[in-house]
Image (cartoon, grey):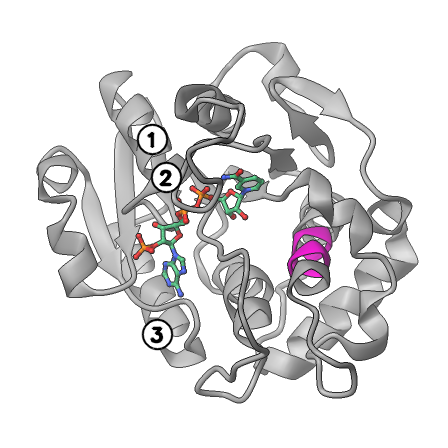
């Protein structure tokens, strides 16, 4: 049985993934943005191996989450699930970054760099990542007029490229990205076509399954099938430039 950290496990696909892994007998470390949000999953938490707390919008709290996870022990897998979709304005994280960049891109990068290296990494992307190419020209939205759909698409391209960069950099780790489909959650809304169980299945399978098909790295998945992501995500030069920019923006270096 594996020990799996799931970020953003208070709701939606993260909570469903936690439920499914717990039901299958795995150890799950939950994550909530605040103590108040943690209290809403007390039932799940009573069955979990731990719960870590921190707002991913804040670099300081994100670093604290990494410390809390490392204090629990080494994870077999981490599912980088937490995310936001439609931010009305660029906003500003405590460190001055665009809110969506901080939560969807900088936080998974920092957690990846700071949490003891697991055996498997899974990043929640979206089919919308294909609209995010060209983002490195103004990663932090300091020059362009705000465009929430574009900002989301870019953040979801970043995590595919991050997953693939790690697959090259850490060959002993299985690192993959997942498009869960348009799923019925707080983010997806009630008219989304994909039920929540289908929406969580691919990331939990990649996190724990011993099926040879799941023991792979550097791939983009949708409903248990491989798909071709945007070409920038697969471009090692784009990946390297992205990692370098994320290192500059966070002050956190990705271990070799
Ligand atoms: N649903 C879809 O149709 C769809 C499609 C493609 C990709 N995705 C991706 O799938 C992932 C999960 O989406 P979902 O539909 O399950 O979304 P959701 O229902 O809105 O849940 C998002 C989770 O992330 C947490 N979170 C958000 N901002 C946070 C922050 N600043 N600090 C800590 N935690 C934070 C939320 O915490 P709270 O409960 O406190 O808000 C919640 O637990 C996301 O990465 C999303 O981009 C979803």
Residue that label 3 marks: 61
Tell me the element at label 3: helix
Which residues are drawn in magenta?
152-158
In front: label 2 or label 1: 2
Q: CB of residue at label 1: within 8 Å of ligand 1?
A: yes
In front: label 2 or label 3: 2
Q: Is residue 195 left or right of residue 148?
A: left
Question: Which dot marks residue 12?
Answer: 2
Cα distance in 3D space between marks 2 and 3? 22 Å
Q: Quadrant of residue 20?
A: top left
Judge the density around disc 1: few (<14), some (14-19), many (≥20) Cα neighbours within 10 Å: many
- Decide whether the magenta segment is chiefly helix, strand or loop: helix
Tell me the element at label 2: helix
Residue depicted at 44% across the width and 58% down the height: 115
Q: CB of residue at label 3: within 8 Å of ligand 1?
A: yes
Cα distance in 3D space between marks 2 and 1? 6 Å
Residue that label 1 marks: 16
Residue 75 visible in the displayed image: no
**Residue 56, image x, y percentages:** 41, 67
């Amino acid at each position: 049985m594996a020990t799996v950290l799931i970020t953003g496990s208070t709701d939606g696909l993260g909570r469903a993934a936690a439920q499914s892994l717990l039901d299958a007998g795995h150890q799950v470390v939950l994550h909530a943005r605040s103590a108040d949000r943690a209290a809403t999953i007390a039932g799940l938490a009573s069955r979990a191996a731990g719960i870590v707390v921190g707002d991913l919008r804040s670099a300081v709290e994100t670093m604290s989450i990494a410390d809390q996870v490392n204090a629990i022990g080494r994870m077999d897998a981490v599912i980088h699930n937490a995310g936001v979709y439609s931010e009305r304005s660029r906003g500003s994280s405590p460190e001055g970054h665009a809110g969506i960049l901080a939560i969807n891109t900088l936080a998974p990068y920092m957690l990846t760099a700071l949490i003891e290296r697991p055996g498997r990494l899974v990043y929640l992307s979206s089919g919308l990542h294909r609209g995010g190419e060209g983002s490195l020209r103004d990663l932090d939205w300091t020059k362009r007029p705000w465009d929430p759909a574009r900002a989301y698409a870019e953040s979801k391209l970043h995590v595919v490229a991050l997953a693939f960069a790690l697959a090259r950099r850490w060959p002993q780790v299985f690192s993959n990205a997942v498009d869960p489909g348009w799923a019925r959650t707080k983010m997806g809304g009630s008219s989304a076509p994909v039920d929540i169980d289908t929406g969580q299945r691919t990331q939990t399978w990649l996190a724990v399954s011993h099926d040879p098909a799941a023991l792979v790295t550097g791939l983009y998945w949708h409903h248990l099938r491989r798909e071709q992501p945007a070409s920038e995500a697969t471009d090692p030069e784009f990946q390297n430039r992205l990692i370098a920019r994320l290192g500059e923006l966070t002050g956190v270096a990705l271990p070799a």
